Image (cartoon, rainbow, N blue to C red):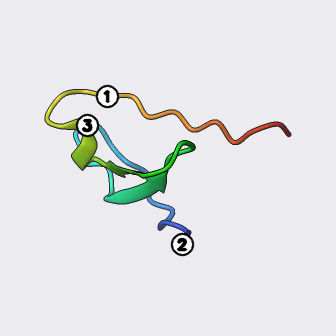
Amino acid sequence: MPRMKNEILDTGDMFPKSTFSKVGGGTFSLPDDLGDDWGVFLVYRGHW
């Protein structure tokens, strides 16, 4: 997966379009899959 630019988002900024693989298969696209509502996206990177 290519790295995104190191830009800091400010209040009201749109999350950059990104696609992630789901554990059970398929993909999840941000911000499209959140719709027009507020949302929280958490990433669990596994055991250190």
Q: Nearer the viewer, residue 29 or 15?
A: 29
Horizontal side of residue 30 vs 38, given as left or right: right
Give the labeled residue for mark 1. Answer: 39
Give me the residue at 31% from left, 28% from top: 39
Residue 33 percent coordinates (x, y)? 26, 43
Q: Are marks 1 and 3 in contact (CB under 8 Å)?
A: yes
Query: Secondary structure beneath disc 3?
Result: helix
| Mark 1 vs mark 2, CA separation in Å | 24 Å
To which quarter of the image does residue 44 belong?
A: top right
Task: Kindly give the residue lying farthest to the bottom in the view shown.
Answer: 2
Q: Residue furthest left?
A: 36
Query: Between disc 1 and disc 3, whose residue precedes?
Result: 3
Q: In which quadrant is the C terminus drawn?
A: top right
Task: Specify the amino acid type for callout 3.
Answer: Leu
Name the kind of residue labelled 2 in the image: Pro
Disc number for residue 34: 3
> Pointer 2: what residue?
2
Look at the numbered disc 2 and give the secondary structure of its residue: loop
On screen, residue 16 above or below 11: below
Quick one: label 1, few (<14), some, or many (20+) residues within 10 Å? few
Question: Which of marks 3 and 2 precedes in the sequence?
Answer: 2
Residue 29, image x, y percentages: 33, 52
Q: Distance between the residues labelled 1 and 3?
A: 6 Å
Comes first in the chain, label 1 or label 2: 2
Is 36 positioned to the left or the right of 14 in the image? left
Whether label 2 touches label 3, CB < 8 Å: no
Q: Dot 3: within a 10 Å radius of its alpha carbon, few (fewer than 14), some, or many (20 or more) residues?
A: few
Question: How far, Cα to Cα, is label 2 from label 3?
Answer: 22 Å
Q: Which mark is residue 4?
A: none
